[in-house]
Image (spheres, helix red, strand yellow):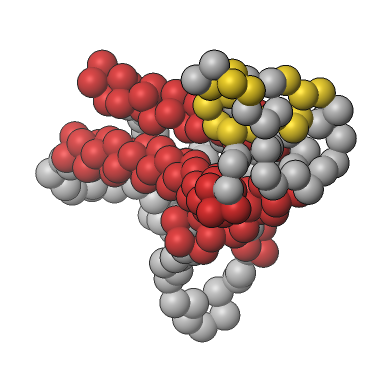
Amino acid sequence: MMSHSMSMGGGKSSECKISMLWNWYTIDACFLAPSWHIKTHGMFAASCIGVALLVVCLEFLRRLGKEYDTYILRQFHRRAASLQYQPRVSYVAPKFDDQRMPGGCGPDASCAPPLPEQRFITFRATPAQQIARGIIHAATFGVGYIIMLLAMYFNGYIIISIILGAFLGKVLCDWLVVKLPLIRGEQSYDESQDEAPGSSEPTVCCG
């Protein structure tokens, strides 16, 4: 265990209790800075609540980043839909003198219209959108790093507060809503689409 003393008004105050092993310190526990020195049980309870809310804030920032990316993607889809609209062109099947032509086209065989050539269009986020994405990511990373530092004090109450905050953050900020088309008749069902959005992403402290 490591401890250090702090002076205040010319006298000595109680020492900070800092341990690199699992502990249940309450009074005289210190976190991140000497100014965060727990002196009363009320102050410690407020610290636990604040840590839990900090984790909720982390989950909110992660959800905000996903929603903002989805918003930009919807803009791209609308622009692509407006660009790909073209008037329909009627297709007239060619006439052949022979009964059968190479390739299966002829009077006795129907000729399907040629398939439209698949084209791709690339969109890029505007500088303002990219800066906004960077700000959200930096805030998420910063809050996650602070939570990681708090967990490294190995205080059982703080770690429980982090876990409870993660639970509340998931419930409040990441409510699963999925829109699926109704399946009629004997249409096949692809089980590979059952994977929930974001389930392949590991949940880590630093976002």
- Residue at 81 percent across and 31 percent down: it is 19
Judged left or right of residue 39, residue 134 is left
Q: Is residue 191 visible?
A: yes
Q: Is residue 183 above or below residue 3?
A: below
Judged left or right of residue 117, residue 37 is right
Q: x and y percent of residue 75 in the render?
A: 24, 39
Q: Nearer the viewer, residue 180 or 18?
A: 18
Extreme-left residue of the structure:
87
Q: Nearer the viewer, residue 63 or 183?
A: 63
Q: Quadrant of residue 153?
A: top right
- Residue at 75 percent across and 30 percent down: it is 18
- Residue at 53 percent across and 21 percent down: it is 8
Q: Quadrant of the C terminus?
A: top right
Q: Nearer the viewer, residue 200 or 82?
A: 200
Q: Quadrant of residue 117?
A: top left
Q: Quadrant of the N terminus?
A: top right
Q: x and y percent of residue 118 in the render?
A: 39, 34
- Residue at 49 percent across and 77 percent down: it is 183
Q: x and y percent of residue 30 in the render?
A: 65, 32
